[in-house]
Amino acid sequence: MSTLRIQKLNVSVDGTMILKDVDLVVNGGETHAIMGPNGTGKSTLASAVMGHPKYTIESGAILLDDLDVTHLPVDERSRAGIFLAMQNPVEVPGVTNFDFVKTAVQARMSADKKLRIGKFILEFEAAAAKLKMGSGLAHRYLNEGFSGGEKKRNEILQMQMLKPKIAFLDEIDSGLDVDALRIVGEAVTAMKSPDLGMVLITHYERLLDYIIPDFVHIMIKGRIVKTGGRELIRKIDSEGYDWLKTELGIDDFDERKKPAALGTCATKVFTK
Amino acid sequence: MAEAKNPTAESVVGEYKYGFSTEAKTVYATTRGLTADTVRDISRIKGEPAWMTEIRLKAYDAFLKKPNSSWGPDLSGIDFSDIVYFIKSSEKVEKDWSEVPASIKDTFAKLGIPEAEQKYLAGVTTQFESEAVYHSTIQELQDAGVIFLDTDSALREYPEIFRKYFGKAVPFTDNKYAALNTAVWSGGSFIYFPKNVKIDKPLQSYFRINTEKMGQFERTLIVVEEGSSLNYVEGCTAPIYSSDSLHAAVVEIFVMDHAYCRYSTVQNWSTNIINLVTKRAVVDSYGHMEWIDGNIGSGLNMKYPSCILKGDHAKGTTISIAFAGKGQYQDTGAKMIHLGKNTTSTIISKSIAAKGGKVNYRGLVSQGPRAFDARSKVECDTIILDAQSSSDTVPTNIVKNFRGQIEHEATVSKVSDAELFYLMSRGLSEAQATEMIVMGFIEPFARELPMEYAVELNQLIKLEMTGSIG
């Protein structure tokens, strides 16, 4: 069982501070949800933990067990066991999904070990079938021409194959229709184990009907302002984030609308 | 235009996988430099008919008179007096593998050629030094009446066909290096497909130059008669030399009515070689010519496979890649000359520059006054891997009638941060990620090659890219 510790993390983008003193501990076997209005820094947190060069860590630390990954290159973080399912996976023409995943799996094996290709193929195909990705997936080019839903499912497939210790799922629900949401939700739930700690980033509650979190954190303006259990989801579902404004005395609250109950992705947007 | 710099052997040794040289017994070689007597000598040693000697001499004359072309890089630095123009390594053309000299077999073994041959070759002409030393033709080709010979033998055995087509697509008056080639040509492949012969299996030829200060002037002549279909693959890797070597080949192809020809090659001369190739196909009505042209070797390489779309509805395709690494200057592209009505052409060019290399796309699409409703599509994409490397795109598009259509798309990019982040977030190192993106970039070319060539190409490019990151 691994533990990710984010300690007093301050992150800027192009000189603007986005994350302020973020603390978060994720243990293997736990599922955390980070919710909050748009543009409050949820995705920044995920990208900063993965090491995206656009995000500058001004202070604080990110520790995976005993390893300080705060300033490690992206690939070393990945090989150490951190994974990020991205909101907008890039398309890489000419590179097949299969070759890519195989190379990635090999990259995290020790040099003296060889990938057992037969076992790998079976595992890849089983994962693709579970995600209902169709048999041609292996030979399609990485994300090229994939629908939004296919791209998201492909992220989950990679996560399954790479077996990370800590995974951030950044708005894995956006772009998914109701059926795809259920498939992804079931696949992710099936991956729950003491060996995997997960952080779901979402501003819609619907995803959390399928993947039940143990902890819910609310992020507003770059800070985690409240942490609780599942009851927070219900409260946000019915009341939005406005009550937090009163409770916490935040003045310039950005989002005036109640967030969508189902989300643009799942069905349609509701406004108050 | 910047002058091409050829690196010293020391600077490339160690990066070049096939950088070995096997000792081969040289039977005859001319002295360095070129005179009319050298030209006569070459023709005499080969026992050529008088008309060929005469063409050689006229071509030599044209070579002396012609200036270097203004198309492409500056070639004024070539010292023609320091080149050996003819070497004969084996007295006769071999038909049986068992008769091939052991040292030559050894070289081929290092390149893995014998196995390759057995796998799916329909016939092989393997050129070693200036002449073919090995040549075999399988029954299928013979039964179909196909002629597949080294060019020297073809001149002896099929003088009528030879004379009818030799120099008709690329006359020696075309350019300085076509003139030079015509004057001193030696070796190359000759393929004649009679009417209605369709063979899907690729015919292949491997060749290699193996003597320092040796020029390589092959002459390839291919005729695909009406309704026939040929898929020809030419491959080469070359060893390292300690000084410059000039390679000026000519490839002439005739694609008759409703015929199809695909000519695939991956050029990988060592980086001290100046490679100047004139490749041209004349395509008749409803004929289709495809050039699959890979350029990863040579210090300076100029190659613009051309199609003259003479007949109505003739079609031309060029799919090419060029890789310029340290000390390399690739100036490549394609030419499509539309003469007939409803002719169509497609050019897809992929270029990569790394470690200070320079790679240019230079192309010409010309639609003549009678080429009504001609359509052309040009797509050239370039990846520049570092700040030391560079690229230019130099297209020339001419439409001389009011019903022609040319589409031109060009992109120049570097490997994007978003792509790198994505691949690295899965555990690939920056070098691995870059390599994978570049491999994906050239995939539209690689997939056109026979599997074995595609694998070799990928390995060679990976090898060339080693150390280009960080």
Image (cartoon, rainbow, N blue to C red):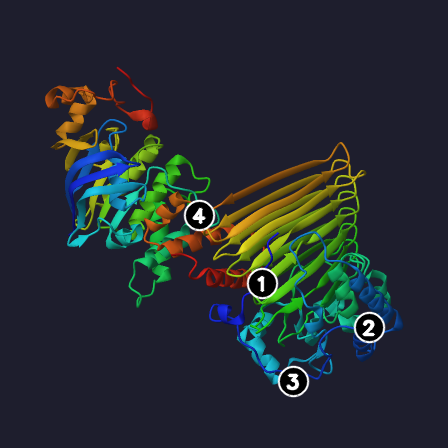
Q: Distance between the residues labelled 1 and 4?
A: 24 Å
Q: Where is residue B154 in the image (x, y as percent from the top left)?
A: 79, 70
Whether residues under marks 4 and 3 lie with C-beta atoms below 8 angstroms apart, the answer is no
The location of residue A45, given as percent across then percent down, is 24, 38
Disc 2 and disc 3: Cα gap in Å?
27 Å
Tell me whether marks 4 and 3 sit on the same chain. yes
The circle on residue A189 is none
How many angstroms separate mark 2 from mark 4 (CA)? 52 Å
Image: A223 above or below B65 = above
- Are tags 1 and 4 found on a single chain? yes
Q: Which of marks 4 and 3 is nearer the N terminus?
A: 3
Q: Which of marks 1 and 2 is nearer the N terminus?
A: 2
Picture layout, residue B186 above or below residue A181: below
Q: Name the residue under label 1.
A: B299
Foreground: B78 or A71?
B78
Q: Name the residue under label 2.
A: B36
Residue A46, located in which quarter of the rendered image? top left
Instruction: Please name the residue that numbered disc 4 is placed on.
Output: B415
